[in-house]
Image: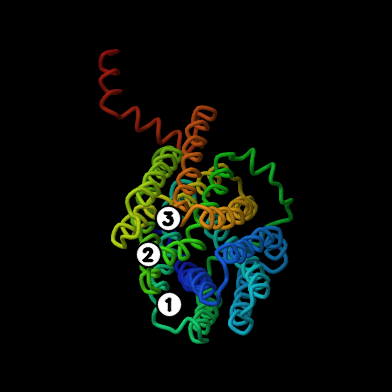
Amino acid sequence: MQAIRPLIPLLIAAGILLAGNGMQGTLIAVRGGQEGFSTALIGLIGAGYFAGFMAGCYVVPHVLQMVGHVRAFAAMAALTASATLALVMLVDPIAWLILRFIIGLCFACLFATVESWINAKVSSDNRGQVLSIYRLVDLVCVVSSQFMIPLFDISGFSVFGVMVIMITLSLVPVSLADRSRPQPPGPFKFDMRFLWHLSPLACVGCIAIGMTGSAFRIIGPVYAQSIGMSVASVATFMSAGIFGGIILQYPLGWLSDRYDRRVALAAASAGAVLAGMFIYLFAGTNETLNFTGIFLFGCFALPLYSLSAAHANDFAKEGEYVLIATGMMFFWSIGAISGPLVASLLMQGFGPGVLFIFTSIVHAALVGMTLWRMTVRATVPRDKRSRFIGLLRTSPMMMKIAKRRD
Protein backbone atom coordinates (compact mmCIF):
# COMPACT_ATOMS: atom_id res chain seq x y z
CA MET A 1 0.00 0.00 0.00
CA GLN A 2 1.54 3.29 -1.16
CA ALA A 3 -0.10 5.33 1.62
CA ILE A 4 1.71 3.41 4.36
CA ARG A 5 5.30 3.75 3.08
CA PRO A 6 6.00 7.33 4.26
CA LEU A 7 4.56 6.41 7.65
CA ILE A 8 6.75 3.34 8.30
CA PRO A 9 9.31 5.14 10.55
CA LEU A 10 6.47 6.67 12.56
CA LEU A 11 4.83 3.25 12.95
CA ILE A 12 8.14 1.73 14.10
CA ALA A 13 8.53 4.47 16.70
CA ALA A 14 4.93 4.02 17.83
CA GLY A 15 5.40 0.25 18.10
CA ILE A 16 8.45 0.55 20.38
CA LEU A 17 6.66 3.14 22.51
CA LEU A 18 3.43 1.16 22.76
CA ALA A 19 5.29 -2.00 23.73
CA GLY A 20 6.75 -0.19 26.71
CA ASN A 21 3.35 1.22 27.68
CA GLY A 22 1.57 -2.14 27.34
CA MET A 23 4.22 -3.82 29.45
CA GLN A 24 3.81 -1.13 32.13
CA GLY A 25 0.04 -1.56 32.43
CA THR A 26 0.30 -5.26 33.26
CA LEU A 27 3.35 -4.79 35.47
CA ILE A 28 1.69 -2.12 37.63
CA ALA A 29 -1.25 -4.43 38.37
CA VAL A 30 0.90 -7.48 39.16
CA ARG A 31 3.55 -5.57 41.15
CA GLY A 32 0.81 -3.70 43.01
CA GLY A 33 -0.71 -7.01 44.05
CA GLN A 34 2.66 -8.20 45.34
CA GLU A 35 3.07 -4.98 47.32
CA GLY A 36 -0.27 -5.63 49.04
CA PHE A 37 -2.33 -3.00 47.22
CA SER A 38 -6.06 -3.82 47.20
CA THR A 39 -7.96 -4.38 43.96
CA ALA A 40 -9.77 -1.05 44.44
CA LEU A 41 -6.43 0.75 44.99
CA ILE A 42 -4.98 -0.78 41.83
CA GLY A 43 -8.11 0.37 40.01
CA LEU A 44 -7.62 3.88 41.42
CA ILE A 45 -4.00 3.98 40.21
CA GLY A 46 -5.25 2.86 36.79
CA ALA A 47 -7.86 5.62 36.86
CA GLY A 48 -5.07 8.10 37.65
CA TYR A 49 -3.38 7.18 34.37
CA PHE A 50 -6.59 7.85 32.46
CA ALA A 51 -7.24 11.11 34.34
CA GLY A 52 -3.83 12.22 33.13
CA PHE A 53 -4.81 11.03 29.69
CA MET A 54 -7.86 13.30 29.79
CA ALA A 55 -5.76 16.26 30.90
CA GLY A 56 -3.35 15.55 28.05
CA CYS A 57 -6.14 16.00 25.53
CA TYR A 58 -6.26 19.68 26.52
CA VAL A 59 -2.48 20.07 26.51
CA VAL A 60 -1.56 18.47 23.19
CA PRO A 61 -3.14 21.04 20.81
CA HIS A 62 -1.08 23.81 22.38
CA VAL A 63 2.11 21.72 22.32
CA LEU A 64 1.64 20.80 18.64
CA GLN A 65 0.89 24.40 17.69
CA MET A 66 4.02 25.64 19.45
CA VAL A 67 6.64 23.06 18.42
CA GLY A 68 5.17 20.70 15.81
CA HIS A 69 4.83 16.93 15.72
CA VAL A 70 8.46 15.78 15.96
CA ARG A 71 9.44 17.96 18.92
CA ALA A 72 6.18 17.19 20.72
CA PHE A 73 6.84 13.47 20.34
CA ALA A 74 10.42 13.82 21.62
CA ALA A 75 9.49 15.92 24.65
CA MET A 76 6.65 13.68 25.78
CA ALA A 77 8.67 10.48 25.29
CA ALA A 78 11.46 11.92 27.47
CA LEU A 79 9.00 12.84 30.24
CA THR A 80 7.43 9.37 30.04
CA ALA A 81 10.81 7.66 30.38
CA SER A 82 11.66 9.77 33.43
CA ALA A 83 8.33 9.09 35.15
CA THR A 84 8.65 5.36 34.42
CA LEU A 85 12.06 5.27 36.08
CA ALA A 86 10.60 7.05 39.11
CA LEU A 87 8.01 4.25 39.53
CA VAL A 88 10.66 1.80 40.74
CA MET A 89 12.32 4.41 42.92
CA LEU A 90 9.08 5.34 44.72
CA VAL A 91 7.04 2.19 45.40
CA ASP A 92 4.16 3.91 47.15
CA PRO A 93 0.47 4.10 46.11
CA ILE A 94 0.29 7.91 46.29
CA ALA A 95 3.53 8.30 44.34
CA TRP A 96 2.35 5.78 41.76
CA LEU A 97 -0.97 7.59 41.39
CA ILE A 98 0.82 10.87 40.67
CA LEU A 99 3.38 9.30 38.34
CA ARG A 100 0.74 7.38 36.42
CA PHE A 101 -1.18 10.65 36.01
CA ILE A 102 1.94 12.22 34.47
CA ILE A 103 2.51 9.19 32.24
CA GLY A 104 -1.13 9.28 31.12
CA LEU A 105 -0.83 12.97 30.22
CA CYS A 106 2.30 12.29 28.18
CA PHE A 107 0.80 9.29 26.37
CA ALA A 108 -2.30 11.29 25.44
CA CYS A 109 0.00 13.78 23.75
CA LEU A 110 1.99 10.98 22.10
CA PHE A 111 -1.09 9.15 20.81
CA ALA A 112 -2.71 12.35 19.53
CA THR A 113 0.54 13.29 17.79
CA VAL A 114 0.81 9.91 16.07
CA GLU A 115 -2.87 9.57 15.13
CA SER A 116 -3.26 13.12 13.79
CA TRP A 117 -0.02 12.60 11.87
CA ILE A 118 -1.43 9.46 10.28
CA ASN A 119 -4.88 10.92 9.52
CA ALA A 120 -3.32 13.95 7.85
CA LYS A 121 -1.55 11.64 5.38
CA VAL A 122 -4.41 9.30 4.38
CA SER A 123 -7.84 9.63 2.76
CA SER A 124 -11.26 8.17 3.51
CA ASP A 125 -10.61 5.53 0.85
CA ASN A 126 -7.86 3.89 2.92
CA ARG A 127 -8.23 5.40 6.40
CA GLY A 128 -9.77 2.29 7.95
CA GLN A 129 -7.00 0.07 6.62
CA VAL A 130 -4.16 2.40 7.64
CA LEU A 131 -5.57 2.90 11.14
CA SER A 132 -6.01 -0.87 11.37
CA ILE A 133 -2.34 -1.33 10.48
CA TYR A 134 -1.45 1.19 13.19
CA ARG A 135 -3.55 -0.77 15.68
CA LEU A 136 -1.93 -4.01 14.46
CA VAL A 137 1.48 -2.53 15.23
CA ASP A 138 0.15 -1.52 18.65
CA LEU A 139 -1.26 -4.94 19.45
CA VAL A 140 1.67 -6.99 18.11
CA CYS A 141 4.14 -4.96 20.14
CA VAL A 142 2.00 -5.07 23.29
CA VAL A 143 1.59 -8.85 22.94
CA SER A 144 5.33 -9.31 22.53
CA SER A 145 6.06 -7.15 25.55
CA GLN A 146 3.79 -9.26 27.79
CA PHE A 147 6.09 -12.25 27.35
CA MET A 148 9.06 -10.20 28.53
CA ILE A 149 7.53 -9.74 32.00
CA PRO A 150 8.12 -13.36 33.23
CA LEU A 151 11.77 -13.07 32.15
CA PHE A 152 12.50 -10.54 34.89
CA ASP A 153 12.06 -10.33 38.63
CA ILE A 154 9.10 -7.97 38.81
CA SER A 155 10.09 -6.94 42.33
CA GLY A 156 13.42 -5.58 41.05
CA PHE A 157 14.71 -2.76 38.85
CA SER A 158 15.51 -4.57 35.59
CA VAL A 159 11.99 -4.76 34.16
CA PHE A 160 11.48 -1.02 34.72
CA GLY A 161 14.85 -0.34 33.12
CA VAL A 162 13.77 -2.26 30.02
CA MET A 163 10.63 -0.12 29.75
CA VAL A 164 12.70 3.08 29.98
CA ILE A 165 15.03 1.81 27.23
CA MET A 166 12.08 1.01 24.95
CA ILE A 167 10.43 4.40 25.45
CA THR A 168 13.73 6.19 24.80
CA LEU A 169 14.48 4.18 21.66
CA SER A 170 11.15 5.26 20.14
CA LEU A 171 12.73 8.68 19.59
CA VAL A 172 15.26 7.35 17.08
CA PRO A 173 13.03 6.57 14.03
CA VAL A 174 11.05 9.80 14.34
CA SER A 175 14.12 11.97 14.85
CA LEU A 176 16.30 10.51 12.10
CA ALA A 177 14.20 8.77 9.48
CA ASP A 178 10.76 10.30 9.06
CA ARG A 179 10.08 12.94 6.37
CA SER A 180 6.28 12.71 6.26
CA ARG A 181 5.65 15.15 9.12
CA PRO A 182 2.55 17.30 8.67
CA GLN A 183 2.36 21.03 9.28
CA PRO A 184 1.59 22.07 12.87
CA PRO A 185 -2.14 22.71 13.29
CA GLY A 186 -3.46 26.24 13.22
CA PRO A 187 -5.19 27.77 16.24
CA PHE A 188 -8.46 26.06 17.11
CA LYS A 189 -10.83 25.70 20.02
CA PHE A 190 -11.09 22.38 21.85
CA ASP A 191 -14.84 22.04 21.31
CA MET A 192 -16.60 18.91 22.57
CA ARG A 193 -19.94 20.05 21.17
CA PHE A 194 -18.46 20.21 17.69
CA LEU A 195 -17.20 16.63 18.02
CA TRP A 196 -20.54 15.44 19.37
CA HIS A 197 -22.40 16.98 16.42
CA LEU A 198 -19.79 15.61 14.02
CA SER A 199 -20.38 12.01 15.13
CA PRO A 200 -22.35 11.13 18.29
CA LEU A 201 -21.73 7.44 17.63
CA ALA A 202 -17.94 7.87 17.56
CA CYS A 203 -18.07 9.81 20.85
CA VAL A 204 -20.25 7.22 22.61
CA GLY A 205 -18.23 4.42 21.05
CA CYS A 206 -14.98 5.83 22.45
CA ILE A 207 -16.52 6.16 25.93
CA ALA A 208 -17.73 2.54 25.84
CA ILE A 209 -14.43 1.27 24.47
CA GLY A 210 -12.56 3.24 27.12
CA MET A 211 -14.62 1.59 29.86
CA THR A 212 -14.14 -1.96 28.64
CA GLY A 213 -10.61 -1.66 27.26
CA SER A 214 -9.20 -0.03 30.40
CA ALA A 215 -11.00 -2.55 32.60
CA PHE A 216 -9.38 -5.36 30.60
CA ARG A 217 -5.90 -3.78 30.62
CA ILE A 218 -5.86 -2.68 34.28
CA ILE A 219 -8.14 -5.17 36.04
CA GLY A 220 -7.64 -8.13 33.68
CA PRO A 221 -4.35 -9.14 35.39
CA VAL A 222 -6.10 -8.92 38.78
CA TYR A 223 -8.89 -11.16 37.46
CA ALA A 224 -6.32 -13.70 36.24
CA GLN A 225 -4.50 -13.67 39.58
CA SER A 226 -7.81 -14.02 41.44
CA ILE A 227 -8.63 -17.30 39.71
CA GLY A 228 -5.21 -18.74 40.58
CA MET A 229 -3.00 -18.01 37.56
CA SER A 230 0.76 -17.69 37.92
CA VAL A 231 2.68 -14.61 36.70
CA ALA A 232 3.52 -16.44 33.45
CA SER A 233 -0.14 -17.43 32.96
CA VAL A 234 -1.27 -13.85 33.66
CA ALA A 235 1.06 -12.64 30.89
CA THR A 236 -0.32 -15.37 28.59
CA PHE A 237 -3.90 -14.41 29.46
CA MET A 238 -3.30 -10.75 28.63
CA SER A 239 -1.36 -11.66 25.50
CA ALA A 240 -4.16 -13.95 24.28
CA GLY A 241 -6.64 -11.08 24.50
CA ILE A 242 -4.36 -8.63 22.74
CA PHE A 243 -3.37 -11.21 20.11
CA GLY A 244 -7.07 -11.75 19.42
CA GLY A 245 -7.31 -8.09 18.49
CA ILE A 246 -4.66 -8.64 15.84
CA ILE A 247 -6.71 -11.26 14.01
CA LEU A 248 -9.75 -9.17 13.07
CA GLN A 249 -8.19 -5.70 13.17
CA TYR A 250 -7.37 -5.42 9.47
CA PRO A 251 -10.35 -7.44 8.12
CA LEU A 252 -12.79 -5.19 10.00
CA GLY A 253 -10.92 -2.08 8.81
CA TRP A 254 -11.02 -3.35 5.22
CA LEU A 255 -14.72 -4.10 5.52
CA SER A 256 -15.46 -0.68 6.98
CA ASP A 257 -13.65 1.05 4.08
CA ARG A 258 -15.99 -0.61 1.59
CA TYR A 259 -19.32 -0.45 3.39
CA ASP A 260 -20.89 1.56 6.17
CA ARG A 261 -18.43 1.48 9.10
CA ARG A 262 -21.36 1.16 11.50
CA VAL A 263 -22.09 -2.35 10.26
CA ALA A 264 -18.58 -3.46 11.25
CA LEU A 265 -18.89 -1.58 14.56
CA ALA A 266 -22.20 -3.24 15.47
CA ALA A 267 -20.98 -6.72 14.49
CA ALA A 268 -17.74 -6.42 16.46
CA SER A 269 -19.59 -5.07 19.53
CA ALA A 270 -22.03 -7.99 19.42
CA GLY A 271 -19.12 -10.42 19.20
CA ALA A 272 -17.54 -8.81 22.28
CA VAL A 273 -20.82 -9.32 24.19
CA LEU A 274 -20.87 -13.03 23.36
CA ALA A 275 -17.19 -13.50 24.20
CA GLY A 276 -17.61 -11.82 27.61
CA MET A 277 -20.60 -14.00 28.44
CA PHE A 278 -18.66 -17.11 27.41
CA ILE A 279 -15.93 -16.29 29.94
CA TYR A 280 -18.46 -15.58 32.70
CA LEU A 281 -20.65 -18.64 32.10
CA PHE A 282 -18.18 -21.33 31.06
CA ALA A 283 -14.53 -20.45 31.79
CA GLY A 284 -14.49 -20.54 35.60
CA THR A 285 -10.95 -21.29 36.79
CA ASN A 286 -10.05 -23.37 33.72
CA GLU A 287 -7.01 -21.74 32.13
CA THR A 288 -7.64 -23.12 28.64
CA LEU A 289 -11.22 -21.85 28.53
CA ASN A 290 -10.12 -18.50 29.92
CA PHE A 291 -7.42 -18.17 27.26
CA THR A 292 -9.94 -19.10 24.57
CA GLY A 293 -12.55 -16.69 25.85
CA ILE A 294 -10.19 -13.74 26.23
CA PHE A 295 -8.80 -14.42 22.74
CA LEU A 296 -12.33 -14.16 21.31
CA PHE A 297 -12.97 -11.07 23.44
CA GLY A 298 -9.88 -9.40 21.98
CA CYS A 299 -10.88 -10.34 18.42
CA PHE A 300 -14.03 -8.26 18.66
CA ALA A 301 -13.39 -5.67 21.40
CA LEU A 302 -9.97 -4.30 20.50
CA PRO A 303 -10.71 -3.17 16.91
CA LEU A 304 -13.61 -1.00 18.11
CA TYR A 305 -11.55 2.14 18.79
CA SER A 306 -10.02 2.31 15.31
CA LEU A 307 -13.47 1.77 13.75
CA SER A 308 -14.97 4.59 15.85
CA ALA A 309 -12.06 6.95 15.16
CA ALA A 310 -12.17 6.23 11.43
CA HIS A 311 -15.93 6.90 11.41
CA ALA A 312 -15.39 10.33 13.01
CA ASN A 313 -12.51 11.23 10.68
CA ASP A 314 -14.64 10.45 7.63
CA PHE A 315 -16.58 13.65 8.37
CA ALA A 316 -13.47 15.78 9.05
CA LYS A 317 -12.23 18.68 6.96
CA GLU A 318 -8.61 19.69 6.40
CA GLY A 319 -7.10 21.01 9.62
CA GLU A 320 -9.51 19.18 11.94
CA TYR A 321 -7.52 15.99 12.43
CA VAL A 322 -5.73 17.08 15.62
CA LEU A 323 -9.02 18.23 17.13
CA ILE A 324 -10.68 14.92 16.28
CA ALA A 325 -7.73 12.82 17.51
CA THR A 326 -7.65 14.63 20.86
CA GLY A 327 -11.44 14.66 21.09
CA MET A 328 -11.79 10.94 20.52
CA MET A 329 -9.14 10.28 23.15
CA PHE A 330 -10.91 12.68 25.52
CA PHE A 331 -14.16 10.72 25.22
CA TRP A 332 -12.19 7.49 25.50
CA SER A 333 -10.55 8.72 28.70
CA ILE A 334 -13.96 9.51 30.23
CA GLY A 335 -14.79 5.83 29.95
CA ALA A 336 -11.27 4.74 30.84
CA ILE A 337 -11.33 6.60 34.16
CA SER A 338 -14.58 4.98 35.26
CA GLY A 339 -13.95 1.51 33.80
CA PRO A 340 -11.22 0.25 36.19
CA LEU A 341 -12.94 1.82 39.20
CA VAL A 342 -16.35 0.28 38.50
CA ALA A 343 -14.88 -3.08 37.50
CA SER A 344 -12.65 -3.31 40.59
CA LEU A 345 -15.48 -2.42 42.95
CA LEU A 346 -17.78 -4.96 41.29
CA MET A 347 -15.09 -7.63 41.56
CA GLN A 348 -14.57 -6.93 45.26
CA GLY A 349 -18.30 -7.26 45.87
CA PHE A 350 -19.30 -10.07 43.53
CA GLY A 351 -16.18 -11.99 42.54
CA PRO A 352 -13.77 -11.91 39.60
CA GLY A 353 -16.19 -13.21 36.95
CA VAL A 354 -18.37 -10.10 37.15
CA LEU A 355 -15.66 -8.23 35.20
CA PHE A 356 -17.01 -9.75 32.00
CA ILE A 357 -20.65 -9.15 32.91
CA PHE A 358 -19.62 -5.49 33.10
CA THR A 359 -17.91 -5.51 29.68
CA SER A 360 -20.84 -7.35 28.07
CA ILE A 361 -23.37 -4.82 29.34
CA VAL A 362 -21.31 -1.91 28.01
CA HIS A 363 -20.77 -3.56 24.61
CA ALA A 364 -24.49 -4.41 24.37
CA ALA A 365 -25.30 -0.73 24.93
CA LEU A 366 -22.89 0.16 22.10
CA VAL A 367 -24.68 -2.28 19.77
CA GLY A 368 -27.97 -0.55 20.57
CA MET A 369 -26.49 2.92 20.03
CA THR A 370 -25.00 1.87 16.67
CA LEU A 371 -28.26 0.41 15.39
CA TRP A 372 -30.16 3.51 16.52
CA ARG A 373 -27.72 5.87 14.77
CA MET A 374 -28.10 3.87 11.55
CA THR A 375 -31.78 4.81 11.59
CA VAL A 376 -31.10 8.48 12.43
CA ARG A 377 -28.24 9.13 9.98
CA ALA A 378 -28.98 6.92 7.04
CA THR A 379 -26.26 8.31 4.81
CA VAL A 380 -22.52 7.84 4.90
CA PRO A 381 -19.76 10.24 3.72
CA ARG A 382 -19.88 11.09 0.04
CA ASP A 383 -16.94 8.96 -1.09
CA LYS A 384 -18.40 5.94 0.74
CA ARG A 385 -21.90 6.66 -0.52
CA SER A 386 -20.85 6.72 -4.15
CA ARG A 387 -18.92 3.48 -3.75
CA PHE A 388 -21.84 1.85 -1.96
CA ILE A 389 -24.29 2.98 -4.66
CA GLY A 390 -21.91 1.69 -7.31
CA LEU A 391 -21.85 -1.71 -5.64
CA LEU A 392 -25.63 -1.75 -5.48
CA ARG A 393 -25.93 -0.88 -9.16
CA THR A 394 -23.66 -3.74 -10.17
CA SER A 395 -25.24 -6.29 -7.84
CA PRO A 396 -27.04 -9.27 -9.46
CA MET A 397 -30.41 -8.18 -8.07
CA MET A 398 -30.13 -4.64 -9.47
CA MET A 399 -28.95 -6.00 -12.83
CA LYS A 400 -32.08 -8.16 -13.03
CA ILE A 401 -34.29 -5.18 -12.21
CA ALA A 402 -32.58 -3.12 -14.91
CA LYS A 403 -33.13 -5.84 -17.50
CA ARG A 404 -36.83 -6.06 -16.61
CA ARG A 405 -37.15 -2.30 -17.08
CA ASP A 406 -35.49 -2.54 -20.48
Mark number displayed over residue 149: 1
- Helix, strand or loop at mark 2: helix
Q: Identify the residue shown where x is 50% and y is 39%.
A: 365
Mark number displayed over residue 132: 3
Where does residue 329 sit, x and y in percent of width and height?
60, 55
Q: Earlier in the sequence, mark 1 or mark 2?
A: 1
Where does residue 157 sit, x and y in percent of width and height?
52, 86
Q: Identify the residue shown where x is 36% and y is 70%.
A: 233
Quadrant (top left/top right/bottom left/bottom right) for the N terminus: bottom left
Residue on which the image places disc 2: 237
- Helix, strand or loop at mark 3: helix
Residue sitting farthest toward the top: 405
Colour scheme shown:
rainbow
Camera-nearest residue between 348 and 30: 348
Where does residue 31 sit, x and y in percent of width and height?
51, 75
Q: Identify the residue shown where x is 67% and y is 64%.
A: 64
Q: Identify the residue shown where x is 44% and y is 46%.
A: 125
**Left or right: 198, with 143 as reference point:** right
Where does residue 227 sit, x and y in percent of width and height?
40, 63
Query: What amino acid is found at the position of numbered circle 3 in the picture?
Result: Ser
Quadrant (top left/top right/bottom left/bottom right) for the C terminus: top left
- Helix, strand or loop at mark 1: helix
Q: Earlier in the sequence, mark 3 or mark 1?
A: 3
Camera-nearest residue between 5 and 250: 250
Gap in angstroms between the C-alphas marked 3 and 1: 26 Å
Query: What amino acid is found at the position of numbered circle 1 in the picture?
Result: Ile
Q: In the figure, 117 relative to 19: above or below?
A: above
All told, the count of numbered labels is 3
